[in-house]
Amino acid sequence: MDAFHSLMAGFGVALQPAHLMWAFVGSLLGTAIGVLPGIGPALTIALLLPVTVKVAPTAAFIMFAGVLYGAMYGGSTTSILLNTPGESGSMMTALEGNKMARAGRGAAALATAAIGSFVAGTLATLGLTFLAPAIAELAFVFGPADYFALMLLAFTSVSVVLGTSRVRGFIALFLGLAMGVVGIDGPSGQARLAFGSPDLLDGIDITVVLVSLFAIGEILYVASRYRSAPPAVNPLSGGHWMTREDWRRSWKPWLRGTLLGFPIGALPAGGSEVPTFLSYTLERRLSRHRDEFGHGAIEGVAGPEAANNSAAAGILVPLLTLGLPTSATAAVLLAAFQSYGLQPGPFLFVNSADLVWGLIASLYVGNLMLLILNLPLVGLWVRLLLIPRPYLYAGILVFAMVGIWGVGTSWMDLLLMFVIGLAGYVMRVYDFPIAPVLIGLILGPSAETQLRRALSIGEGNPMVLLSSPLSIALIVLALAVLFLPGLLRKLRANA
Amino acid sequence: MSAIPQRRRPWWLGLAVIAIGAVWLQQGYGLPAASGYGGVGPGDFVMLVGAALIVLGLALLAQIARGDSFDPQEAESAEAGARPSRRALLFAAAGAAIPLLTMRPLGFPLTAMLSFALVTHAFGSRRVLLDCIIGLALGAICWLGFTRLGVTLGGALPLAGW
């Protein structure tokens, strides 16, 4: 019951009025950016990073957690009412939810999404509460070789899973790794790839890369292919709330979605696309109203929404216990930890118990707040969509400049913003995934450190990387992630 | 998704990846050799990354030669299949590039105004004066607010010594 006591102490932290205020601000902000196009949770947290110089770490992370969860709620609102999923996790919601909205059942779809998100978020946070300390215990035995193998697994899985092509996924990853080596090399004190610029000696800041890729790349891309017709919002009025029948059809998909989302989100491959897709397929197969799928089946909203939210909580498991980010949002959260001089991993649970448990407790609180914010106030959130697009995107650029210029008022950062922003545009046009760049950038330096440490222990013998059963298992898994999809395809083609 | 098939083959993409890899390989090669017990010097990981990028660039070239298609990603308020407007792209890119020229002499609020106006123009707004006013107001509010929050955004108008 150790976790239980820690959690109670965490509630003591999270329920302080100041922290409740930060959770509220985060939830509000998160919902808003979830509704607005062009900004996601990763970008928002990156833009908030410079502000954190004046905010204590616990308060900042409570706010970030609100942004993370709030974006999920906001994202489902737009996919249901507008058929424009703000992030890949709500793609499946848009499928059935938008059909429901068109049939005048928008209110019921929004309700099942919000309540499902609440149920899933709460249950998954419960999972996080009891699973994370156990994994953190396990992680104490990890040696450098094991960590290196774990990162290899993360590298291969993000490159393979988060994109349409393995080659393009790996190019994105290695571009991130390439940017990660810029700056002074710790062990030797050598400047690497600084090209004589003193600004580059500190390395390339992840905020600069993330903001440029997500904000600048997106602005350029949308500007060049702008559809000036205003989006058609499905009216909410006249809709019925969830009926008794809706409840009966929703509660099982909520639970099944949660069960799918949390473990998959917690894997190093992570992500929310796979669990939401699986949940949708599962509900379609199990439903007694299979004919309604494709025309607005409520199960098709309830399941994927729950899966999406519980995957978001799952992502926090490897992040907090192993320091391993598996999505763009997790990568920027890791950067936030680093900017406070904290290293997520087993020691975080020992050294910063207040912060970790306050953060976990605030996830429960934030979920409740979001349910209250979202159910009655949906009409208000939708109004955000009335902001004219030219002002919205120009405003995003101004905030991006705050984020980048605020890192260190460096001209080099502005140059990087422009160049990496253009790269972000090219990556969108030619369909390169973006998250692997960030994972490579933030994990690359620690992967290199662990590799060099492991090789030092083994006195240069590369076999040291396969010296423990754990590292062998992880490397085998990494290779499996790399080659299994192709093998399966071949087998299927032969059959 | 569908729309105009991309006839042209983007060879330059593969070449660009190879070029980046070559720079990293060459720079890594120039770093001092191995030191310490591990036999891994500061340049080895750099060279590994460079070599991997070259291999991946070649693989990309092979895909392009095979005629693989590249479907643009979906985004809100954008039509992935639409023919891109070069003019709008140039204006938006100018909005992202203008801080390089103006941020140090003119400061944050005026730079924000110029960027704001350029991007709104790229998105089809033609009310230049109104856009400039909104941009300046937004820039000034951001500068004041974030400076108070402890984020350093430089002087308000460095040319005038503010």
Image (cartoon, helix red, strand yellow):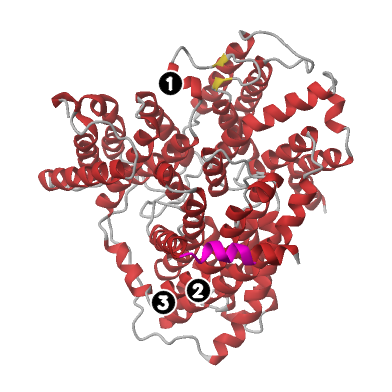
**Label number found at residue A329:** none
Q: Nearer the viewer, residue A3 or A236?
A: A3
Labels 3 and 2 positioned on one and the same chain: yes
Instruction: Tell me the element at label 1.
Output: helix
Q: Using a 10 Å C-alpha cutoff, classify the residue at mark 3 as few (fewer than 14 neighbours), some (14 to 19) or many (20 or more).
A: some
Main secondary structure of the magenta stretch: helix
Q: Would you say residue A72 sits in the magenta stretch?
A: no
Instruction: Tell me the element at label 3.
Output: helix
Left-right relation of B42 to B161 = right
Circle 1: residue type:
Asp
Quadrant position of the C terminus of chain B in the picture: top left
- The residue indicated by pointer 2 is A114
Q: Position of residue A174 (x, y in %)?
A: 61, 30
Image: magenta residue range: A8-16
- The residue indicated by pointer 3 is A102
Circle 2: residue type:
Ala
Residue A80 vertical position relative to residue A175 in the rendered view, above or below: below
Left-right relation of B85 to A47 = left
Q: Position of residue A78 (x, y in %)?
A: 42, 65
- The residue indicated by pointer 1 is A199
